[in-house]
Image: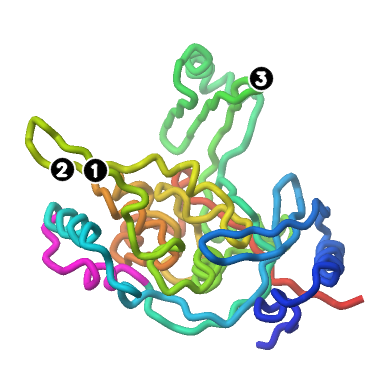
């Protein structure tokens, strides 16, 4: 399918700012979005000038389309000796005999070309199944009154209780305690819900990889090297070097080159319309399993571990704790 050339990245990047603003305002008007303003996002060597819109209290951006190469087939420029050591240790600890490149090729998507349509994209993900309720809600008072009182006195920021298929969550915010009840949903119900609320849909696998990586040829948006997010420390008791994660939360939660926050938390799996059904994380399996490098790989644009997703995903019953939705819409723009 051919898309308007002005909305494709190679042409879009060359348009004068006034022309971009005119088009972006028209896109917002034609799609019922509220204009917030233009902004240029730069990250990891890529840059996009776009608009921020709001719709039903959520922020969206315009993402230009492009024809790109997706997937991963090896370290683009090799990896440092430090990274080789880190991978050798991690794979050995989990009895994986393959070298790092061979192993990673087995859990990443194949290299292919794809044409991505211009889109409107939610800047952040949306929870599945959780309904914000008041303290006076009959269901809370009937089933979770004691738990509510416990939550109010607790030192932690969030508590959750599961009673069969029922779930109750209390989360402390600056405004007080936010309460939520969970309603189990299938993937089909999730898709129906977001379609009704503005004719949005889930991204495809190709679209998600483009949104997260922009067509990069490396494993991560910043490259293939892990060392910028690691630090070493000498353990005097065992006389050995021990590696730790640097706290990357603040850095990875910054908007990327399209202005969206994506691939920032390996606990979060974003549902997609095709492929294996999700991208962006492994539900925390690698973190909880004690792995050092794999939590980053799980958030890579190209992570596609078939065995992992077969075990984690159930299309008849989404997991509202680890599965999330990013709403997208193909842009159909009619020049005024």
User: What's the residue at 24%, 71% (across, down)?
Assistant: 101
What residue is rendered at 46% in x and 57% in y?
Answer: 316
Q: Which mark is residue 232?
A: 1
Circle 3 residue: 136
Around disc 1, counting alpha carbons within 10 Å, would you say few (fewer than 14), some (14 to 19), or many (20 or more)? few
Nearer to me, 244 or 267: 244
Q: Secondary structure at mark 3?
A: loop
Foreground mark, 3 or 2, reads 2
Could you say which is closer to the camera, residue 54 or residue 51? 51
Magenta residues (range) = 94-108
The quarter in which the C terminus is drawn is bottom right
Helix or strand or loop: what does disc 2 sit on?
strand
Q: Is residue 170 above or below residue 66?
A: above
Q: Residues within 10 Å of mark 3 (few under 14, many from 20)?
A: few
Image quadrant assignment for residue 141: top right
Mark 2 or mark 1: whose residue is earlier in sequence: 1
> Where residue 81 sits: x, y (%)?
21, 62
């Amino acid at each position: 399918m051919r898309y308007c050339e002005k909305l494709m990245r190679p042409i879009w990047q060359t348009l004068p700012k006034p022309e971009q603003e005119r088009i972006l305002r028209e896109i917002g008007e034609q799609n019922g979005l509220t204009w917030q303003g233009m902004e240029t996002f730069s990250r990891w060597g890529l840059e996009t000038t776009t608009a921020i819109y709001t719709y039903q209290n959520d922020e969206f951006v315009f993402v230009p389309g492009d024809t790109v190469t997706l997937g991963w087939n090896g370290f683009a420029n090799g990896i440092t000796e430090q990274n080789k050591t880190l991978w050798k240790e991690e794979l050995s600890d989990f009895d994986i005999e393959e070298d790092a490149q061979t192993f990673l090729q087995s859990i990443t998507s194949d290299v292919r070309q794809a044409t991505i349509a211009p889109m409107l994209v939610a800047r952040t993900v949306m929870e599945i199944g959780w309904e914000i309720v008041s303290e006076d809600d009959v269901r809370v008072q009937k089933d979770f009154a004691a738990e509510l009182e416990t939550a109010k006195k607790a030192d932690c920021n969030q508590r959750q209780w599961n009673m069969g298929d029922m779930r109750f969550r209390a989360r402390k915010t600056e405004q007080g305690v936010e309460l939520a009840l969970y309603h189990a949903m299938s993937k089909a119900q999730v898709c129906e819900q977001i379609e009704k609320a503005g004719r949005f849909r889930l991204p495809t696998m190709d679209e998600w990889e483009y949104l997260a990586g922009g067509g990069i040829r490396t494993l991560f948006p910043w490259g293939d090297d892990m060392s910028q997010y690691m630090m070493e420390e000498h353990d005097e008791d065992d006389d050995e070097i021990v590696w730790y994660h640097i706290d990357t939360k603040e850095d990875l939660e910054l908007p990327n080159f399209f202005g969206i926050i994506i691939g920032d938390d390996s606990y979060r799996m974003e549902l997609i319309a095709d492929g294996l059904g999700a991208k962006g994380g492994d539900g925390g399996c690698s973190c909880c399993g004690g792995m050092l490098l794999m939590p980053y790989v799980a958030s890579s644009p190209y992570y596609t571990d078939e065995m992992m997703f077969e075990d984690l995903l159930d299309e008849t019953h989404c997991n509202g704790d680890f599965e999330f939705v990013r709403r997208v819409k193909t842009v159909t723009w009619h020049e005024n």
